[in-house]
Amino acid sequence: MEPLRIPLKLIMQPGFQQYDCTGCGECCRGRFAIVINQDDRDRIVEQKWSEEELDLAGKPLFTPHGDGFQLAHRADSSCVFLQDDGRCRIHAVHGEAAKPLACRMFPFQFVPLGNQIRVDVRFNCEATSGNLGRPITEHRADLLELLKTAVPAERAANMPVPPLHGSVQLTWDQLSRITKTFERVLLDVSLNITVRIAACVDLVELIREAPPEAFVGKALSEYLDEAASVVTEDAINSPLVADPHVGARHGEPPATHASPALPPSDQRARGGKVAPSGTHLAAFRQVLAIYGCVDKVGAKARLWNRLGLQLRMLAGKGQVPTLQEGFPNVRFADIENARGIPSGEAALTLERYLHVHLMSMGFFGQSFYNRGYLDGLRSLLFTYPLICWFARAYAAAEGMSEINRSCVERALMIVDHQHGIASALDSPTERYRTNFLCERATLRSLIIWYGS
């Protein structure tokens, strides 16, 4: 396959996101299948590693993965090239350029969008979750070099534009303009983080209900401006806004033939904290079980154990099962106790996570189970109550009355490890369950319940 030759613009987040590898080695300890291409395989074979050198005792360097291969793992699920000091043996002996492409890319991902390549960052890494290292803009030269082999030319040039929703088809430029409107709402620091996320849910609804003429020419910019004003005004009047007078500086949005308006039935309980129904909470806990469980590479599938976890999460009583190694020892009731709206560094961390994934536009299309734009965006917003639930678990275990930055960072690593990657989340059952939980009223309820 020919390397990328066509001229593309590499779009990266500004310096608000930072990263440098801390050498913790967690990404090499069985949490990922390290898939390799033929060039990687040939290069590693040419490096002539001995079985004794890698403590393999007659075992292969590679194991099958789909139609290709992945690096072999030891009995403890660690990569065969992981040293005791947490460093990669290939890197130590031959340099970083000799490592497999997947290893050199992590935690970055390329998102092809027509004549652009955007950069996304995975948060299932302590460095990205904790925002440790240099601004990612300083990795630009390395990423440009990786881009030459990471993205096949035909994939970038012929990437189909996913639908906005249903059969509504827009251009990459129009989807980019819609994304900027969501950024505008997300980054309105005059509102607390939970209210902003709920406002983004409302914005999804207004865009979904937009008439066809709203997407023609300059009408799109006008509609998006009005929609952002409507959801912001509604958010200002939310009971969750600390200062009810903050909205005095906002005027009424101008009225046009396509002026957006929230459904009247929702105007009665703007932002109000209403507990999700028992049915919704049970479905939510089942999704939490999928996000929280991690099967290490090479480990035997323990189906009965997983089923037991699912049933205990469904019941939602007593002690929360140990979903993964290091998960806190808490009771369901402790997590349901209010912890307040995330603030300070905790809120900034949540904002950074959503901002990175929003800007990358990797939350839909081929980067996310081939979902349409708005469905993928709702799923991204759905991670907020998931993250808050896990963060509450850590806060409860440590006897804290509110979640702090450390709780959020650990929760991010759990949720983002599965989001958009776990095949279970793309099964028909889970797609149905997620759509059920992402209906506007339900999603708002979950966001406000666990985010305040």
Image: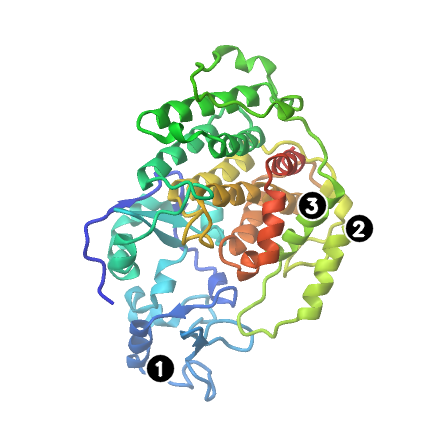
Based on the displayed image, in which of its 4 quarters is residue 65 positioned?
A: bottom left
Disc number lying in front (1 or 2): 2
Q: Which mark is residue 367?
A: none
In terms of depth relative to the viewer, which is nearer, 428 or 25?
A: 428
Q: Is residue 124 visible?
A: yes
Residue 398, label in figure:
3
Do the residues bearing badges 3 and 2 touch, measured as CB atoms within 8 Å?
Answer: no
Question: Which callout, 1 or 2, points at the residue further toward the start of the chain?
Answer: 1
Q: What residue would you read off at disc 2?
A: 317
* Residue lying at 35% horizontally and 71% vertically, measured from the top left: 90
Q: Where is residue 78 in the image (x, y as percent from the top left)?
A: 50, 71
User: What quarter of the picture does the N terminus occupy?
Assistant: bottom left
- Which of disc 1 and disc 3 is earlier in sequence? 1
| Dot 3: element | loop
Q: Under tag 2, what secondary structure?
A: loop
Alpha-carbon span between mark 1 and mark 2: 52 Å
Closer to us: 124 or 301? 301
Rendered view: 171 above or below 160: above
Could you tell me the amino acid type at mark 2? Lys
| Residue type, numbered disc 1 | Trp
Q: What element carries label 1?
A: loop
Please state if 111 lies on the left or on the right of 351 as rendered. Answer: left
Q: Quadrant of residue 403?
A: top right
Location of residue 402 in the rendering, given as x and y in whole percent from the top left corner: 66, 36
At horizontal 37% and vertical 22% (from top left) the residue drawn is 222
